[in-house]
Image: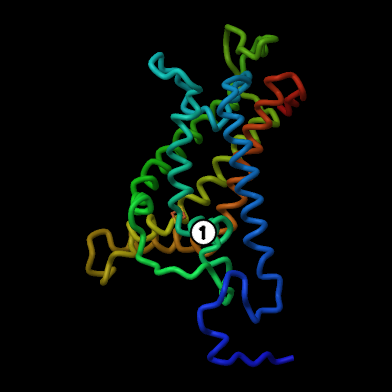
Amino acid sequence: MVTTVSPRDLEERALGATVRRDSWWAAPAAVGAGLTAFGIYSFWAAWVNQNYEWGPYLSPFYSPLFKPSWWPLSPAFLILGAPLGFRGTCYYYRKAYYRAFFLDPVACGVGEIPHNYQGERQLFLFQNLHRFFMYLAVIFIGILGWDAILSFIWPVNGVLPGGEMAPGPREFGVGVGSLVLTVNVVLLAGFTFGCHALRHAVGGNLDCVSCARFGRQRYALWRGVTRLNERHMFWAWISLFWVGFADLYVRLVAAGIITDIRIL
Ligand code: FES
């Protein structure tokens, strides 16, 4: 059935008013539920300040591992500021949470709370820092990549009952947690290296690629970033889910609730 939309339908409407017949509310509802669940879990995981390392494994929420004496709370609150700022200012996440939490607009072709949009001012000026959070996020990929490498280096004498590495020589080994932490950094890299701001930085700001210094290399980089960027939403969600899962896995092993299986 073809729905006719009159000019009157296109006037600004009350919140939720629409001629759409599809389940337009499903996406913002799912986004709101997903971000709320992740926010509650990650706040709790950061707050408890324990069970974040076991043997060669370190939770990504507590990496890089440091415990400053001047900071009275869990160090995870200092660490998580960077990834939170990166995701909070991400162009995709902005669209997602503006719709889910501010209903502004809640969906295309659906009425919102009438107001005059005046750009991103006051607190929303913070969104302009995305490029700088992107630089930090790239550094974090290096840190988490190093953690993933370390997760393959095991003590020959095994892991002590408290989760510490036994003293003595080390050897190569693979546990399920090694794979969990490796997949984690791969997915986070897929999200980070598909960033719109990175795409602009590596080649999107050029008017003439062949005239620029290192133009060929920059064009290759730009194409690589573009391929990831085309599925930025996918990478955003899969990496968010997996980083929470990676913390949970290390946490359950460290708490003795599950046993890590050594594959090699
Ligand atoms: Fe999403 Fe930069 S735009 S991470």
Residue 68 x/y as whole percent:
41, 17
| Residue 128 as seen in the image, left or right of residue 229 | left
Kindly tell me whether residue 217 is visible in this rendering.
Answer: no
Please indicate whether residue 105 sits to the left or right of residue 179 in the image: left
Image side of residue 107 versus residue 81, left or right: right
Q: Nearer the viewer, residue 180 or 93?
A: 93
Q: Is residue 243 left or right of residue 89?
A: right
Find ligand 1 in the image and state its quadrant.
bottom left
Q: Which of the image's four quarters has the N terminus?
A: bottom right
- When the figure is inspected, residue 258 is found, relative to residue 141, above or below; the finding is above
Q: Residue at x 50, y 59 (%)?
A: 92
Residue appearing at x 41%, y 43% in the figure: 138
Q: Give the quarter of the image for residue 128.
A: bottom left
Q: Measured from the top left, where is residue 259 in percent x and y? A: 76, 23
Q: How is the image coloured?
A: rainbow
Label 1 sits on residue = 98
Q: Nearer the viewer, residue 229 or 245?
A: 245
Is residue 18 something that shows in the picture? yes
What residue is drawn where x is 51% and y is 83%? 11
**Count of numbered badges drawn on the protein:** 1
In the rendered structure, which amino acid carries the disc numbered 1? Tyr
* Disc 1: residue Cβ within 8 A of ligand 1's nearest atom: no
13 vs 144, nearest the viewer: 13
Q: Residues within 10 Å of mark 1 (few under 14, many from 20)?
A: some
Q: Residue 255 at what x, y percent from top left?
A: 70, 19
Q: Is residue 110 above or below residue 134?
A: below
State the image quarter where residue 71 is shown.
Answer: top left
> 23 above or below 130?
below
Q: Position of residue 147 (x, y in %)?
A: 52, 29
Local SS, label 1: helix
Q: Residue furthest top?
A: 167
Q: Quadrant of the C terminus?
A: top right
